[in-house]
Amino acid sequence: MAFVEPVTLRDRGIRLEPLALEHEEGLRAAAADGELWKLRITSVPEPHDTRAYIEAALKMRADGNRFAFAVVNDATGTLLGTTSYHDILPAVKRVEIGYTWYRQSVHRTHVNTTSKLLMMGHAFDTLGCHVVGWRTDNYNFASQRAIERLGAKKDGVIRGHALRRDGTIRDTVMYSMRSGEWPEARAQLLYLLEQHALY
């Protein structure tokens, strides 16, 4: 049995469902909204690479390394983007959350906060994780701010860690949250959502 089993998570009009090949058309449209693949600090696929992107995610799922979700508007069925558990370590009950991107038209809305709340809740409350982690490009300042708003703590920077799409080598900023920090983080995120402080 896999540590992360297929599950669909819902809240505030957002549905996270296991990413599958039938999401190809919707994910292609999401990537095209804002031409996000042109950003050198993200992993958004070019529209013609969408199927290969999904196939790679499914291969990583089969290998136990990643579980990707499609992020969907629950009312309309519109695919908004994708997010994943990755670097899954069952022995120490740790997952990371990443490979996250959304169509540009839902940036700075409740979509990311709601998606992360669902994933963190499932990781800590259902999977029994001790730690949830995040990583991002040292130049992706928007991502760093978003991770910090979740209540994660900065662990440090791994220098010369990975290649960007343009062939340059990036430093990776690492963050984490321990299970004991989750209740306070959850309360704060729920407060922000209730106050419509959606960033």
Image (spheres, rainbow, N blue to C red):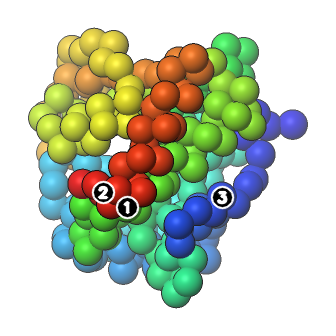
Snapshot quadrant of residue 85: top right
The type of residue carrying mark 2 is Leu
The answer to whether residue 169 shows anywhere in this view is: yes
Q: Describe the element under mark 1 as helix, strand or loop.
A: helix
The type of residue carrying mark 3 is Leu
Q: Position of residue 146 (x, y in %)?
A: 28, 42
Q: Residue 86 carries which label?
A: none
The answer for how far apart the CA atoms under marks 2 and 3 are is 20 Å
Q: Which residue is drawn at 58% across and 62% down?
A: 11
The type of residue carrying mark 1 is His
Q: Residue at x 18, y 44 (%)?
A: 142
The answer for how far apart the CA atoms under marks 3 and 1 are is 15 Å
- Left or right, 184 with respect to 161, comes to right
- Left or right, 180 with respect to 32, comes to right
Classify mark 3: residues with Cα within 10 Å, few (<14), some (14-19) or many (20+): some
The answer for how far apart the CA atoms under marks 1 and 2 are is 5 Å
Q: Mark 1 highlights which residue?
A: 110
Classify mark 2: residues with Cα within 10 Å, few (<14), some (14-19) or many (20+): some
Snapshot quadrant of residue 122: top right
View extreme (bottom): residue: 76
Classify mark 1: residues with Cα within 10 Å, few (<14), some (14-19) or many (20+): some
Q: Mark 2 highlights which residue?
A: 198
Q: Where is residue 84 in the image (x, y as percent from the top left)?
A: 52, 47
> Is residue 190 or residue 124 the one in the foreground?
190
Q: Where is residue 190 in the image (x, y as percent from the top left)?
A: 47, 48
The C terminus sits in image quarter: bottom left
Give yes or no for contact between labels 1 and 2 (Cβ–Cβ under 8 Å). Answer: yes
Q: Mark 3 highlights which residue?
A: 9
